[in-house]
Structure formats: C-alpha cells, structure tokens
C-alpha cells in the first residue's frame, strides 16, 4: 500500500472513518455502489477473489480444490488462510454474519 509523505492529523483514524461510512449504508445496493465508486475494477476483483475463498477455507476445502473451483491463485488462497488464522477477525465476523442462502 502506498503511503504519502504528508502530515496527517493523527487525531482521526482514517480506517475508522471509512468503516463508519460503510456502516451508514443501507443494503447491498448502496454498498455495491459505494464499492464501485471507491475501488478500481482490479481492487474489486482482488477483494471478491479473497472473499470467495473464505467460506471454502472455513469448510476445510483444500487449496488446490478451491483454486479449481474459483480460479483464485493458490498464493492468494494461502494469504487469506493466514489472515483467517492470525488476522484481526474480520473475515470470521463477516462469515458469521452473512445471510444464509437456501441450498
């Protein structure tokens, strides 16, 4: 991630500001519109790739099978797996809170 060499007001956490903006959105349509405005197509693709493998990893699906099913690189799958194990808990919280789909 690029860091700019400028003075920043340390009294406000920029991630907290973004998180607050996300929490203020109502429903998937507003969230999608916000993400499409905020992110480049490549960034959206990277985030959706990561999110697509989270449920599969939580179900214990092997990396190679996840790759075969999603097309996501084994390297990315490994990074997501490490984050699931040692990250801040965001993936697990989102996975737990996601609506269940009828199968």
Image (spheres, rainbow, N blue to C red):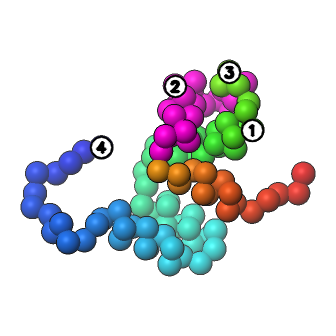
- Give the side of residue 14 with respect to residue 38, left or right: left
Chain-order first, disc 2 or disc 4: 4
Instruction: Label 4, secondary structure: give it.
Output: loop
x and y, in percent, of residue 80 in the image? 54, 37
Which residue is denoted by mark 2 in the rendering?
Answer: 75
Chain-order first, disc 1 or disc 4: 4
Residue 1: give its label: 4
Measure the C-alpha gap from mark 1 to mark 4.
30 Å
> Which dot, 3 or 1, sits closer to the camera?
1
Measure the C-alpha gap from mark 2 to mark 4.
18 Å
Categorize mark 1 by other alpha carbons within 10 Å: few (<14), some (14-19), many (20+).
few
- Give the side of residue 21 with respect to residue 71, left or right: left
Chain-order first, disc 3 or disc 1: 1
Measure the C-alpha gap from mark 4 to mark 3.
28 Å
Q: Which residues are magenta?
A: 65-87
Chain-order first, disc 1 or disc 2: 1
Say above or below: 92 vs 18: above
**Residue, x 43% and y 73% (percent of image)?**
20
Kindly check if marks 2 and 4 are in contact, taking CB atoms under 8 A apart as contact: no
Which residue is denoted by mark 1 in the rendering?
Answer: 59
x and y, in percent, of residue 66 in the image? 69, 29
x and y, in percent, of residue 63 in the image? 65, 25
**Residue, x 75% and y 63% (percent of image)?**
99
Measure the C-alpha gap from mark 1 to mark 2.
19 Å
Chain-order first, disc 2 or disc 3: 3
Instruction: Label 3, secondary structure: give it.
Output: helix
**Is 77 covered by the magenta stretch?**
yes
Categorize mark 3 by other alpha carbons within 10 Å: few (<14), some (14-19), many (20+).
some
Quadrant housing residue 19: bottom left
């Amino acid at each position: 991630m690029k860091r700019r060499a400028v003075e920043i007001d340390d009294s406000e956490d920029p991630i907290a500001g973004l998180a607050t903006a996300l929490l203020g959105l109502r429903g998937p349509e507003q969230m999608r519109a916000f993400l499409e405005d905020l992110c480049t197509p490549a960034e959206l693709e990277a985030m959706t790739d990561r999110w697509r493998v989270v449920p599969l990893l939580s179900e214990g699906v092997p990396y190679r099978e996840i790759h075969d099913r999603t097309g996501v690189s084994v390297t990315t799958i490994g990074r997501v797996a490490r984050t699931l194990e040692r990250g801040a808990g965001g993936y697990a919280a989102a996975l737990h809170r996601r609506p269940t789909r009828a199968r």
